[in-house]
Amino acid sequence: MNFTMFFPRLVLEWNSLGASKEQFKEFTDGLALNQGIEILDLRNNQITDESTVDLANALKHNTVMIEVDLRWNSVGVVGAKALWDVLQQPSSAILKLQLCGNFIPDEISSYIGPLNMCKKCRTGWFA
């Protein structure tokens, strides 16, 4: 996915992208370079903590992504922490991060939700 075409919304749900660590890493490397995708839907793709860290690293370089849907994957504490770190960066444009159906304890996900709401209020964007 190392190209510059403009796809404002990329829906890849139910594709088992996380089944191959190497292929998912290639995907995230391309995602880091792509500044056209604003909405990324990765629901139900067997994405693990390790792959979520790769995704988080890509999102640190992507300044236009406003929504990421990671529902129904295998994200745990390590992946949630990596995403938390991205959301705290001032350069992050992410306004909506969906994580339901993963292996993230409620006490951790309760910190992520308010941060998303705070960023929405700060930018004047409401879902």
Image: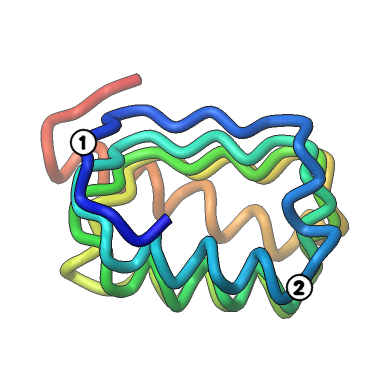
* Residue where numbered disc 2 is placed: 21
**Residue 23 falls in image quadrant:** bottom right
Label 2, residues with CA under 10 Å away: few <14, some 14-19, many ≥20: some
**Residue type, mark 1 in image:** Phe
The percent position of residue 124, horizontal first and vertical second, equals 12, 31
Let me know if residue 107 appears in the view.
yes
* Above/below status of 124 relative to 126: below
Residue at coordinates 57% horizontally, 76% vertically from top-left? 54
* Above/below status of 44 relative to 102: above
* Residue where numbered disc 1 is placed: 6
| In this picture, residue 61 sits left or right of residue 51 | left
* Above/below status of 75 relative to 82: above
| In this picture, residue 115 sits left or right of residue 63 | right
The percent position of residue 63, horizontal first and vertical second, equals 19, 59
Let me know if residue 87 appears in the view.
no
Which quadrant of the figure contains the N terminus?
Answer: bottom left
**Residue 25 falls in image quadrant:** bottom right
- Tell which circle, 1 or 2, labels the residue nearer the N-terminal end: 1
Gap between marks 1 and 2 measured at Cα: 25 Å
Under circle 2, the secondary element is helix
Residue at coordinates 26% horizontally, 56% vertically from top-left? 34
**Residue type, mark 2 in image:** Lys
| In this picture, residue 105 sits left or right of residue 84 | right
Relative to the observer, which residue lies in front, 36 or 63?
36
The percent position of residue 105, horizontal first and vertical second, equals 83, 61
* Above/below status of 108 relative to 100: below
Label 1, residues with CA under 10 Å away: few <14, some 14-19, many ≥20: few
The percent position of residue 76, horizontal first and vertical second, equals 80, 67
